[in-house]
Image (tube, rainbow, N blue to C red):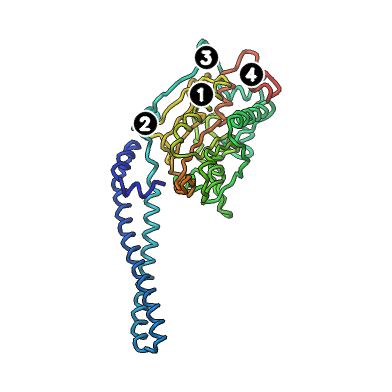
Amino acid sequence: MLLLNLLRQDPESVIKALLKRNLDARPIVNEILLINEERRKIQNKTESLKAESNKTAKLIGLLVRDGKASEVNEIKSKTALIKKELLSLEKTLLDLEIKEKETLLSLPNTPHRSVKQGFSPKENEIVSTWENDPQRTNDGLIPHWELASKYNLIDFERGVKITGAGFPIYTGNGARLQRALIQFFLDKNTQEGYKEIQPPYFVNEESSFGTGQLPDKEGQMYHIQNDNLYVIPTSEIPLTNLYRNEIIDESKLPIKMTAYSPCFRREAGSYGKDVRGLNRLHQFDKVEIVCIDHPDNSYKRLDTMVNHVAGILKDLGLQYRLLRLCGGDMGFTSALTYDFEVWSAAQQRWLEVSSVSNFETFQTNRLKLRYRQKDNKISLAHTLNGSALALPRIMAAILENNQSPDGINVPNVLHKYTGFKKIS
């Protein structure tokens, strides 16, 4: 949620920044400012009436003490009118506060100055690329869903029978490779100083609101109505909410966390090669990294997180490219996002496997997640997160890019986790 003070002090900078998202925010910003002005007037009038009511109550006490009953009755009539007006003003004030918050929530985060305006993923900037084997040919390769069937690694059909499309079943060496990747990612993250957390997979409404999934992505989340709980689409939600409504001592920053969790998303798509196999799922596994940091350090931290994810992909030998997202392709809560895409040799296309983002104060303003400086001043922290990594498309790329006539070669770094070097 954008800071109201920023809107009041410099609305033009917010309007200009949101143009990068192709959003004309002027009508909404003007509406917020008008609501805020009216709310502040009502609030000042309410406080003045409360002060007058308190003053009158003290006066009544003095008059009663002095036996001036006739004057007391006259003042009590005046007090009754004040209380009636206060009730009306307090209702109006509450309505304005709700309207102000709802309107403010409709605005996405302002993009970082490095973000370019754009309308679609085609306008994202390629920052860098890395290729393990530039001489390798892609001729004659078969896609991962055929490899998964050939080597009995993933059973898509039985997943449909048990649950529905987008819920694959990993079997045998496919399940072991999946488990190996999870352990490898967690080990890499903990070696980098991220504390491992095992979070709950269900969160309450306040948690979903705090990280920005609600109300923006309400239709994309599975909801348990009887308990009013949401099934997590990412472990970012429980990890970041660990420090909701808390004040952290500045010396404790940064707080670095990692977690494995299954993730559940309703918007998995329908038909076509872009969603076939592991390309897009309703349930998938992911290892996440989250950082809470000082505002002065958050963009250096973002670079560190990006380099960390790049190192994992290099360890796996996967060709990748790093993109800086344009304003039109960024998530609602992000100020700056980098995406990693790996090359799918058989499909001849790039597959997104990680997003690494800085949210600045957008989430912490909702979460009331603050830090205490040495001078005891309280300020909002910055939050960042990234996938390190999402498994389905990593699995797809490993199968497709490492296939050979006699099987699939497992990346060297995974041998100690899988217990085998080749799938055949």
Label 1–label 2 contact, CB within 8 A: no
Residue contact between numbered discs 1 and 4, judged by CB atoms under 8 Å: no
At 42% across and 34% down in the image, what residue appears? 336
Dot 1 amino acid type: Val
Disc 3 marks a residue whose amino acid type is Asn
Q: Nearer the viewer, mark 2 or mark 4?
A: 2
Q: Mark 3 points at which residue?
A: 138
Q: Residues within 10 Å of mark 1 (few under 14, many from 20)?
A: many
Q: Give how far apart the Cα atoms at labels 1 and 2 are.
A: 24 Å
Residue 233 visible within the image: no
Q: Which of marks 3 and 1 is nearer the N terminus?
A: 3
Q: Which residue is drawn at 34% across and 68% down?
A: 48
Looking at this view, is 51 or 281 the one in front?
Answer: 51
Q: Where is residue 270 in the image (x, y as percent from the top left)?
A: 50, 35
At label 2, the amino acid type is Ser
Q: Please tell me whether mark 4 sits on a helix, a strand or a loop.
A: helix
Give the Cα distance between marks 3 and 2.
35 Å
At numbered mark 3, what does the secondary structure look like: helix, strand or loop? loop
Say which label, 1 or 4, has the lower sequence index: 1
Q: Is residue 314 left or right of residue 72?
A: right
Residue 114: mark in rendering = 2
**Which label number is shown at residue 342?**
1
Task: Tell which circle, 3 or 2, labels the residue nearer the N-terminal end.
Answer: 2
Evaluate if marks 3 and 2 touch, with contact meaning CB atoms under 8 Å apart: no
In this view, the mark in front (4 or 3) = 4
